[in-house]
Amino acid sequence: MAKFTRHDGMNNLHPEQRRILQSLTPEEKLQLAIRLHQSARELKAAALRSQHPSWSQRQIEAAVRETFLYART
């Protein structure tokens, strides 16, 4: 039987970062996750605008949606 190990991103944090994250309420953690997701989408949109200057805003938004829907880069 295969042994599965849990990947815990908290191991890669500075102790102060870990302390701060552990002190957040569930609601604060959710809000942080939402902001991080939105930031990632904005960064992807900016990268696509740079790579495809002729694309319309609608094309950029569709490519961002597809990227996050299928977890592609």
Image (spheres, rainbow, N blue to C red):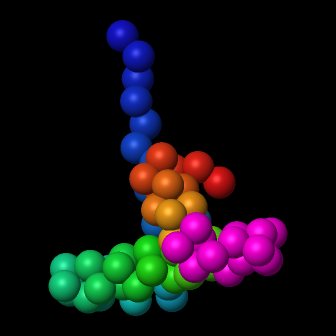
Specify the principal SS of the magenta part.
helix
Residue 58 to residue 25: above or below? above
Work out whether 67 lies above or below 47: above
Please tell me in which quadrant of the rendered image residue 18 appears: bottom left
Magenta segment range? 45-60
Image side of residue 12 versus residue 4, left or right? right
35, 49: nearer the viewer: 49
- At 68% from the left edge and 80% from the top edge, which residue is drawn? 46
Q: Which of 64 and 6 is in front in this view?
A: 64
Quarter of the picture holding the N terminus: top left
| x, y percent for residue 54 | 76, 74
- Identify which residue is drawn at 63% across, 76% down: 56
Quarter of the image where one finds residue 27: bottom left
* Residue at x-position 80% and y-position 69%: 51
- Is residue 51 a member of the stretch shown in magenta? yes
Is residue 33 a member of the stretch shown in magenta? no
- Residue 15 visible to an observer of this rendering: no
Residue 40 x, y percent position in the rendering: 54, 75
| Numbered disc total | 0
- Can residue 61 be seen in the rendering of this structure? yes
Q: Is residue 55 above or below residue 19?
A: above
Q: In this view, does 73 lie to the left or right of 39?
A: right
Residue 48 is situated, as x and y percent measured from the top left of the image, at 70, 70
Q: Is the C terminus in the top left, top right, bottom left or bottom right quadrant?
A: bottom right
